[in-house]
Image: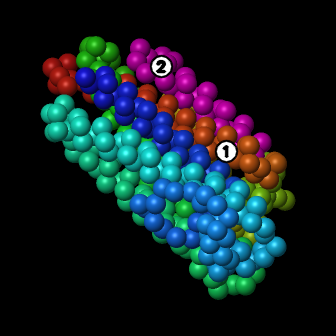
């Protein structure tokens, strides 16, 4: 039964990953502000011209439409569908997770530790829905600067993505634990225990750096920072540090709002992530454990570097941007899978 639970959790994690990528597509298509009301219980889709006219009239009261009043009803229908599909997908995924969880819980098939973890995941998923609306709401408010682009606040977008990645990681790790309860068949000696300990530190470093890269990537996406400094390895006319990265009045404002600084931070974390994964792979080649996932992590991060450079040179078009975001989740998955495969076995003290 643990295998069944594991595959259910693995499919849920895949669903969360897909939802994150669909969220990126929604943002790139500028569709996220088309639904201006938050009704979590609502599943329906406008069925006739009367319902469409009502939705469109409601949308016309908000800043995004005011900034582009020539939008037609047909154009509105296109972006509305994208956002409706995103919200419906999220609610459907929530039910797909919650209903089996209740069954497994009531059937006594979950150990106490799994109950706590999955209850946390359920709560985090529900909270993520609230944060999603909190993010959207920021784009429905009239900006203080009339020249500003109408978009959600990039800081809230970054929080929304960070929570989504946390949820994905939690569910993915839980799935792996159900499918591979321990590593006692892999780590069978003190020498292998020491080798796994050496790699675990590198995996943890890679995971934290990848997470930082992903969050700063959300800031890049939210500010369109990928459309500035579109050359590599330079920053415009500079090689090591972009001109204008410290133009804001305060340091906090520069790190939060300055597009040149945001891109610089994202690139820096990307470099550090790549270097840490290459070091992980280098060390693993001389060890007896953890080599396979270290190699796959290295391949995934190499592809990520190529996609990042390609996206930058082409000013972040939709195909490259989505591929870059999706592959970032693959990098994180490889690192999590590698770390999970070399965690300490239950009786590791007997090996010391």
Assess disc 2: are there few (<14), some (14-19) or many (≥20) residues with their C-alpha within 10 Å of its C-alpha: some
The N terminus lies in which quarter of the figure?
top left
| Label 1 crowd bin: few (<14), some (14–19), many (20+), radius 10 Å | many
Using the image as rendered, state which of residue 156 and residue 49 is in the foreground: 49
Q: Nearer the viewer, residue 235 or 224?
A: 224
Split into 4 quadrants, where in the image is the C terminus? top left
Q: Is residue 236 above or below residue 309?
A: below
In the image, is 240 to the left or to the right of 287? right
Magenta: predominant secondary structure element?
helix
Element type at marker 2? Answer: helix
Which residue sits at x=42%, y=37%? Answer: 12
Q: Quick check: 190 above or below 138?
A: above
| Horizontal side, residue 168 vs residue 246: left or right | left
Q: Quadrant of residue 34?
A: bottom right
Disc ID at residue 322: 1
Give the number of the mark in front: 2 or 1: 1
Q: Is residue 298 within the magenta segment?
A: yes
For image coordinates 65% across by 37% down, the residue present is: 304
- In this orientation, which residue lies closer to the viewer: 343 or 98? 98
Residue 27: give x, y in percent of width and height.
65, 57
Q: Look at the numbered disc 1 and give the secondary structure of its residue.
A: helix
Residue with the mark numbered 2: 291
Q: Position of residue 321 (x, y in %)?
A: 70, 47
Tags 2 and 1 touching, CB below 8 Å = no
Residue 9: quarter of image: top left
Give, as a single range, the part of the protein colored magenta. Answer: 282-311
Residue drawn at (65%, 80%) of the image: 61
Residue 137 percent coordinates (x, y): 53, 72
- Residue 4 image-quadrant placement: top left
Q: Is residue 188 visible?
A: yes
* Picture residue at 43% right of the left edge, 61% below the top: 40
Image vertical order of residue 163 relative to residue 190, above or below: below
């Amino acid at each position: 039964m643990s295998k069944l639970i594991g595959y259910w959790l693995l499919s849920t994690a895949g669903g969360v990953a897909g939802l994150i990528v669909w969220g990126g597509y929604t943002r790139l298509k500028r569709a996220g502000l088309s639904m201006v009301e938050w009704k979590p219980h609502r599943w329906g889709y406008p069925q006739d011209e009367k319902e469409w006219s009502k939705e469109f009239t409601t949308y016309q009261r908000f800043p995004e439409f005011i900034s582009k009043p020539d939008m037609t009803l047909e154009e509105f229908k296109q972006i509305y569908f994208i956002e409706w599909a995103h919200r419906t997908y999220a609610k459907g995924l929530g039910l797909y997770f919650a209903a089996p969880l209740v069954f497994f819980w009531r059937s006594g098939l979950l150990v106490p530790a799994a109950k706590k973890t999955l209850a946390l995941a359920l709560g985090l998923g529900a909270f993520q829905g609230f944060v999603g609306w909190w993010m959207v709401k920021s784009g429905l408010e009239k900006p203080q600067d009339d020249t500003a682009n109408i978009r959600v606040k990039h800081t809230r977008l970054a929080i929304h993505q960070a929570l989504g990645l946390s949820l994905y990681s939690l569910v993915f790790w839980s799935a792996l634990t159900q499918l591979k309860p321990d590593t006692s068949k892999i780590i069978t000696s003190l020498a292998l225990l020491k080798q796994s300990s050496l790699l675990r530190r590198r995996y943890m470093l890679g995971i934290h750096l990848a997470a930082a890269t992903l969050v700063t990537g959300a800031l890049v996406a939210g500010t369109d920072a990928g459309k500035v400094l579109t050359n590599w390895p330079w920053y415009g006319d500079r090689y090591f540090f972009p001109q204008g990265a410290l133009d804001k009045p305060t340091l906090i404002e520069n790190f939060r709002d300055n597009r040149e600084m945001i891109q610089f931070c994202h690139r820096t974390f990307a470099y550090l992530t790549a270097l840490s994964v290459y070091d992980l792979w280098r060390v693993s080649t001389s060890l007896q454990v953890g080599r396979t996932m270290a190699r796959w992590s290295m391949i995934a991060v190499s592809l990520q570097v190529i996609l990042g450079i390609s996206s930058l040179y082409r000013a972040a078009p939709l195909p490259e941007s989505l591929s870059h975001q999706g592959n970032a989740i693959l990098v994180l998955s490889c690192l999590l899978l590698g770390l999970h495969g070399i965690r300490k076995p239950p009786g590791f003290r007997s090996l010391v």
